[in-house]
Amino acid sequence: MTHTTDNAWEHPEVQLAGGGYIVAFVVGLALMGLSLWMVRGHVFAPTGLAVAISALAAVAAFVQCVLLLHMTVSRTQVWQTVALVLFIPLFVITIGLTSWMFHGLYRRTMMMPATHVARPATPTRPRGA
Amino acid sequence: MLVHIDGPWSPLLGRLALSEIPYNNPILVGTFVFAALLAVILVGLVTYLGLWRTIWRDWLTSVDHKKIGIMYILIGLVMLFRGFMDAVMMRAQQAMADGPHSAGYMDSPHGYLTPYHFDQIYTAHGTIMILFAATPLLVGIMNILVPLQIGARDMAYPYLNAVSLWLTAAGAALVMASLFIGDFAHAGWFGIVPVMELPYSPGVGVDYWMWAFQLSSIGTTLGGINLLATIVKMRAPGMTWGRLPIFTWASLSANLISLSTFPVLSVALALLALDRYLGTHFYTAGLGGNLMLYNDLFWIWGHPEVYFVILPAFGMISEIIPTFSEKPLFGYLGMVLASLGIAGVSWGVWLHHFFTMAASPAVNAFFSITTMAVGIPTGVKVFNWAFTMFRGRLRFELPMMWASAALFYLLVGGLTGMMNAFTTNDYMVHNSVFVVAHFHMMLLLIVYAIFGGVNYWFPKVFGFRLEQRFGKIFFWLFTAGTAVVFIPMFTLGFMGMTRRLAYVAFPQWRPLLDIEVVGIVIYLLSAVFLVAQLYVSFRDRAQNRAGLDAWETSRSLEWMTHSPVPFYNFAVTPEVHARDERAWRVEHGVDTVRPERYEDIHMPRNTAIPLWLGALSFGLAFGLVWRMWWLTEVCGLAIFALIVIRSFDRDTDYTIPAADIERMERAIRDVPSGRPVVAGVRGAVPAFRQGV
Amino acid sequence: MSVTTSSTLDAKGSPMWSSGHGHDVISTKTLGFWLYMLSDAMMFTALFAAYAVLGHAFNAAGGPWVRAVAHAGVAFQETYWLFGSVLAYGLAMMALKKGNRGGVLLGIAAALVIALGFLAVDGREVLDLFRMGALPERSGFLSAFFTLVFYHGLHVVVGIAWMAVMLVQVASVGLTEKVVYRLLNLRLFWHFQAVMWVFMFTFLYLRGAIV
């Protein structure tokens, strides 16, 4: 609306800003650095490493969501947080189910020797046959 | 980088040349002459009546959610007609091209359409019906109703609302342009890869399809954001979540779907565009691409889209049935949870569109079970509607007829859907016309709800009721047509007829195909009565004027403002006290309480920028289709510039003084409106809590 | 089941029409923009899903695979440029909290310059890969890889353009309601792409060093 008060910046959403931004910067960089160090030094076996860096990414994303994007349940932010929480299962479903179905598909149709496939393609026998 | 295409190309016109205009195809020439005549008549009529100024000032540049909704519905109706004509052509072709001895006309070996032309027609039919008929019709209805039902002045972002409309219009215009300039895609409405890839479809058809889809997808995503923010933030005081009208709940669920899935469609199409323009290998058969990836991404959108269109339809049925049963809706909470449940489950079923992909049995079983789970919330809804009608004082006026007939089609479509959910069964009927008949039942249920909704809310939007006699003839003919076309189609599916046949090899299917033609003729006949209904309603509009509550037993907030709704919706924002506010006020005898005091109202100013953005998007897409790079660049830059320029515009709103509001309100009140009070029972006792 | 609990209300006594009802423009705008960002997150999700499908060795079709194209060290450089820009924008928001126009301008200008630094590193990396023959049209794997890289890069470019516009608006118009909600929306946009970068860094670049 055209009639604005002189101090629109006093809106509660503006007032959310704070030192959390600096914390997010430090923590985010530290976590990413830790991931890099773990990967460089091969501190775990590949599978463990993948789990570890995924976990660190999740922590970093969570910290950023809370400190940078202010995803909290306070009065001003609650709908933003609700929307995000509703979307997270969709992110998981999209990537998870897609990976799952293509994993099966590749295992059943790609006959080439592929290093990444967990198990080599074996002809499946119908049960009870 | 940019893929080189053999063939003529000029810097000015790109791939466009005179030979791309199908002037030698009598069907298209005939269509063109018809469209051109219609355009000339319309332009002449508008000029004769001196309406150009009104159209520009009050409609094309409007940011009013009701007018935008009406324009959405007009686009939807025009495209519905176009999609219907495609259906007529397909039925005619299959009836003619039957058996090796069937005659061929116009360069076609059998029937009158060459296979390539036939393929374009079914692609256009599907694309149009889903994206440019059902979606705009429902988005339009949601646009009109949601702000009224929650007591808001407008949508949360009126300007963005207009942008969404014009993006959709640009997409529809692109589909229409493909009729007369170049051709359309020939690989089905959902696209078959790798047929959609450049080596197999070097023409512009796929590009038309792709960019029209993309524009509509962006428009619908933005529209979804708008409706969600409106419902969350713009509710009138007292409108708690527990009091939200059921149609608004349905819209909320539907737009959660549109917000979350249309982006995936955008990605699926963008990756196809990258393949076609830049030579990447997302969906190619070789070089590390995976063509099933396209199906995966497309149906992640595609199946939830079905629920995106069906949820508002359910919402409309849920509003119509209580009004004409003169009872509150049975099981409000169950209905809300069912809507949200359908939206949630819709996210986990998409693989059932390609059960035959060769995914592992566990994957197929998972998606089979989730698909059957859709039946649970849908069943809850059906029983709630039935219990709403149970012991109600039923009145079969037109909206109620459409709504209750929709339940029958829901039953047929839903049960055949359950049959398809069984993987084993799906292997048998996959790609057969059985599946086609199933989803037509579901989509026709939506059409039924739309016709019911249009009849129901028409007086709210235009101030007079639609005529009933021709309306009822239209209803019965339409219903007969539906049965006669689609029951034989189920049978043909069981007999093994696959979909998309330009030539029917088995003469024993002929009788059933001929019956389908009879059905489509009944449909054509019904359209005549629709036109008659609209004409008579308009002619007799003075007699059919409606008051606040056109049906006298309506329940929700939108029936508390004038019919037609003034541009500011409510002169003063209502306080909401109950779930069915209108019915509550009638019951407590406070429905005639008028505001004591009026206040200034802030309204957004009309602007032509959304219209320009739509036109420029059309130019951008058209340039991409024909590879006229200069057009694409100019339009792209202009879009960016317009957005920036608009952000510097400080004068986007204005204020209507309270005195003006009061004057306008008095003027509306002084017009003798509303039907004369009917003697007898109807509407006199709102039966507010009867039977529950 | 009761239809409504409010029938106990005294209908005649309660107000039928509300007065002085207005809605909070700033938080309506930011909610809508956040919903838009979620739809954008869905696009990232779809691209990540495509990458999950096309990220296998055989999707490289004999061309360079992830080990050859994903350089974790360079990506970490990009990370601190990007997070630095995000921090600078955060400092601009802290200045906005006090209505300090000069501070806002300074913070956004710093964020813009640092973001250009990110683009420089990112751009050089991509050009090196192109020179090496790792082009998006080489294989399905590289198509998915580069599409994610470019889609994130597009966000940075759009962010930079938006910051430039906001610099002009803050300087010329001042901290009006419209400018303030745009600054808040830009904050959401800019901080959101940093969250996406966390996943890019982990699943695109670090993965190269694991497999």
Image (cartoon, coloured by chain):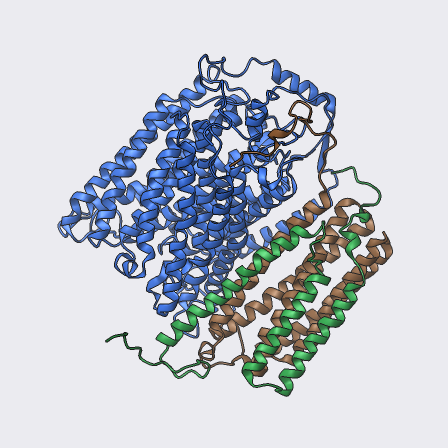
Determine if residue C97 is in view: yes
Query: In the image, is residue B397 above or below residue C34?
Result: above
Which chain does the blue colour mark? B
**Position of B150 compared to B427: left or right?**
right
Which chain does the brown colour mark? C
Which is more toward the observer, B33 or B449?
A: B449
Residue at 84% in and 43% down: A6
Query: In the image, is residue C63 above or below residue B602?
Result: below
Look at chain A in the picture and name its colour.
green
Q: Position of residue B365 (x, y in %)?
A: 36, 64
Image quadrant in which you'd find residue B164: top right
Q: Where is residue B305 in the image (x, y as percent from the top left)?
A: 45, 50
Residue at 84% in and 57% down: C95
Image quadrant in which you'd find residue B165: top right
**Position of C143 compared to C38: left or right?**
left
Which is more toward the observer, C44 or A27?
A: A27
Which is more toward the observer, B676 or A37?
A: B676
Determine if residue B39 is in view: no
**Position of B174 compared to A59: left or right?**
left
**Position of B689 compared to A122: left or right?**
right
Q: Position of residue B449 (x, y in %)?
A: 41, 36
